Amino acid sequence: MLLVVGRIGRAHGVLGEATIEVRTDSPEERFALGSVLVTDPSNRGPLTITSARVHNGILLLGFQGVNDRNQVENLRDTILYADVDVNAAGVDEDDFHVLQLIDCDVITDAGIELGKVTDVIALPGQDLLSIAGKNGEILIPFVYELVPEVDVANKRITVIPPEGLIDGE
């Protein structure tokens, strides 16, 4: 599946390096030398990575056939996509891809159906599960204490809701 992994920013230097706004948790994997990235708009790619380095905390990439600053500026704001297997095992058992969680049924540990996951909101402290409940959106921090079981194979997530989340508690 094609997923957004970055966006090309401004040129860096005169030799064709581009600053990259990283939009992936695995930049070392997605931006490895030789990787081929699909682009939006499509007429700007595909782009093959020929160099990758971090300079002052910013990822810089070089692409095959892009040899000067002007060529990079023509690619500015291009969205980069990588072909990602969302069902591949993560680094550890608690690694999930957002697409694996979308549309999962959410139930409480007491068996009460809350709704379906519609989004995973990335926040600095932790992610939030956004659940479409019968009375509107429910947000639950995606931490083990509140979300002890995620069964992506059966599209089911068990939560221990904080007090007051469900009517009558």
Image (tube, helix red, strand yellow):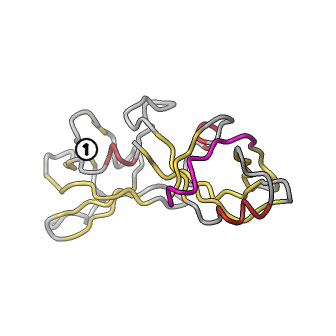
Please tell me whether residue 49 belongs to the stretch shown in magenta: yes
Q: Nearer the viewer, residue 72 or 107?
A: 72
Quadrant in the picture for residue 12: bottom right
**Residue at x 53% of width, y 58% of height:** 125
What residue is at 19 percent from the left and 63 percent from the top?
133
| Residue 24 spot, x, y in % from top left | 55, 49
In the rendered structure, the answer to whether residue 104 lies left or right of residue 95 reads: left
60 to the left or right of 135:
right
Residue furthest right as drawn? 14
**Residue stretch in magenta:** 41-51
> Is 136 above or below relative to 115?
below
Quadrant where the N terminus sits is: top left
Kind of residue sitting beneath label 1: Thr
Q: Is residue 124 left or right of residue 3?
A: right
- Residue 72, given in percent of the width and then of the height, sits at 72, 60
Q: Residue furthest bottom?
A: 136
Residue appearing at x 37%, y 33% in the figure: 87
Tell me which corner region of the image, top left, top right, bottom left or bottom right, holds residue 129: bottom left
Q: Is residue 106 left or right of residue 87?
A: left
The quadrant of the rendering that contains the C terminus is: bottom left
Who is closer to the viewer here, 137 or 16?
16
Q: In the rendering, at what x and y percent does residue 156 appear?
A: 22, 42
Label 1, residues with CA under 10 Å away: few <14, some 14-19, many ≥20:
many
Total numbered labels placed on residues in the image: 1
The residue at the point 74 percent across, 48 percent down is 62
Q: Is residue 42 magenta?
A: yes
* Vertical comparison of 83 with 9: above or below: above
**Residue on which disc 1 sits:** 158
91 to 129, vertically: above or below: above
Task: Name the spot of residue 60 as percent of width and height, x first.
Answer: 74, 52
Q: Secondary structure at mark 1?
A: strand
